[in-house]
Structures are given as structure tokens and as C-alpha cells.
Image (tube, rainbow, N blue to C red):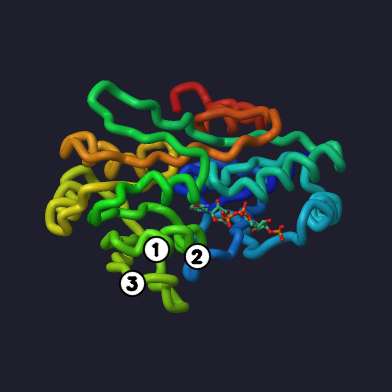
Amino acid sequence: MTRALVLGGIADASLLAAEIARAGIDAVYSYGGRTRAPADQPLPTRIGGFGGVSGLADYIRRNGITHVIDATHPFAAEISRNAIEACAKTGTPLIALERAPWTRAPGDNWIEVGDVAAAAAALPETPAHVFLAIGRQHIAPFGARPQHAYTLRFVDPPEAPLPFAADVIVSRGPFTLDGELEMMRMRGINWIVARNSGGDGARAKIDAAHRLGLPVIMISRPTLPERLRVESVAEVMQWLGHRTPLGA
Ligand code: NAP
């Protein structure tokens, strides 16, 4: 009998949870516990780390998990690496649900870098208004570039003081092209730092930068070991052995 573990935390994971619940497949949804009030899921939910590879392997064994779906954010590399190892250890099939990264279109002004430190180093010397579209736990390197005025955007208000002065927007989204254009114009944003998350949800800021002809420092995804990867919820459902009924 199938019993799936969905490692979640992104919009696609919620879409998948809804499909799994609709199909009546036994499953558990797991949150990492970073967001204070995570969205309700239509599946039994657990919150918080497993305790590394061995903790995850134990969880899989103890809970009779037959399939693991890694639907975590493409930059959540630690849990994805742990899932690869824990599934190999326990002989559990693993699939990753991950949108393709964005690719540069004609007219895009991107500077592609490998990590956050390189992104901070890629900012100009002259003072700029920078929209830093990255998680709060990654912002420290920008403290070394204090000549810039930073705008940050988080899902929850920061609990601890930030390592440098910045304007903070608290919003969960969704973000639209018009909304992003207005935000960037209002704040005089002239540089953007973003991670190449891919997908539609976070894309509006990249489209807005394109429209406004602004430079984007684009941080590439971390590299992971080879694993089965698909881009759509429907492909995961097929992998779980669910066939869409005729006429549905
Ligand atoms: P990470 O660096 O890969 O993971 C750090 C640790 O958090 C993992 O080793 C694991 O702890 C725990 N963890 C992460 N995701 C988990 C999950 N779904 N269920 C149970 N434990 C989980 O990940 P992160 O960048 O901190 O992201 C944490 C969560 O937020 C992920 O679920 C991710 O999908 C979501 N998220 C992340 C981003 C982002 O920008 N990174 C954006 C949107 C959503 P143990 O080793 O103790 O098991």
C-alpha cells in the first residue's frame, strides 16, 4: 500500500497535497518549520526537521513510508541532499517536483553568480537602491556593502534585528507584474538580487526588472546529486500510480 511523504514548503507542494488528498492516497505533509504560520494542508501534517539523514531514514522506516516526494524550494539543498541519502539507505523511491530554472530572454540584463557572497560582490561601487529578494538567513554578506539602500521582503516580520539598516516589506504574495512595477518605481529600485527559483509564483519581479530595464544579479541554484525530477504535479501523481479517471 502506498504511503507518501511530501517534503513541502512551496506553492507547488500545496497543489500536490490537494491532488493527493483528492485521489485518496495516504500521505503525510512535512514542513521545515521556518514559516511561523504555515498554510493548512488537506493532509496530515508534521512540522520541523527530522534530525539529518539518519533521522529522516528512521522516520521513513517507522512510518511505513513507501514514496518520498521532494517538493521543497530549489534552494533548500540540505533537505534535498538528506532525502536522496535517506531514500538510498532505506530503498525508498524518491521523486523531486521542481520547476525548471528561469532562462535569460533577449533584453534581460542579468549578471549570473554562484552564491550570495558573489551576489554582494557584484553590486556596483556607487550607491544604489537594491531590492534583495532573498531569504533573511542569507542577507549578511550585504552588510559589507553599506553604501546601498536595501529593500527586503519577508513572509513574517523579522524577529531579530537585521544585520544592517533596510526597508522591510512583509508580504506572503502572490506578487503580480503590476504590483512589482509599482513597488520598484515607488522605491526607486535600480538593482535587483534574486535567486533562480523558477516557476511562475516568483517570476513577477524578474518580469518587472525586464520591463524597467534593470540589472538583476541572479544567483544560480545549488547543484544536487542526480535524482528523478519532474516539473508538474500531474507527473508526480502518475509516479504514485494514480490515473486520472476518464472524463475528469
Ligand atoms: P534546508 O537548508 O535545505 O534545510 C535545513 C533543515 O531544515 C534540513 O536539514 C531539515 O532539518 C529541515 N527541513 C527543511 N525542509 C524540511 C521539510 N520540508 N520537512 C522537514 N524538515 C525540513 O532548507 P531551508 O532553505 O531552510 O528551507 C526550509 C523549508 O522552507 C523547506 O521546506 C523549503 O521548501 C521551504 N522554503 C524555503 C525557501 C528558501 O528560499 N530556501 C523558500 C520557500 C520555502 P533536519 O536535517 O533536522 O531534518
Residue 110 location (% of width, % of height): 33, 33
Q: Are marks 2 and 3 in contact (CB under 8 Å)?
A: no
Q: Does the residue labelled 2 lie within 8 Å of ligand 1?
A: yes
C-alpha distance separating marks 2 and 1: 7 Å
State the residue position of label 1: 155
Q: Which amino acid type corresponds to the residue marked 1 in the rendered image?
A: Val
The residue nearer to you, when weighing 103 against 31, is: 103
Q: What amino acid is labelled 3 in the image?
A: Ala
**Closer mark to the observer between disc 3 and disc 1:** 3
Disc 1 is placed on an element classified as: loop
Mark 2 or mark 3, which is nearer to you?
A: 3
- Mark 3 sits on what residue? 165
Q: Which circle's residue, 2 or 1, is located before the other in the chain?
A: 2
Vertical placement of residue 203 versus 182, above or below: above
- Residue position for label 2: 35
10 Å neighbourhood of mark 3: few (<14), some, or many (≥20)? few
Does 147 sit above or below residue 14?
below
Which residue: 32% across, 66% down? 170
Percent position of residue 6, x then y: 63, 47
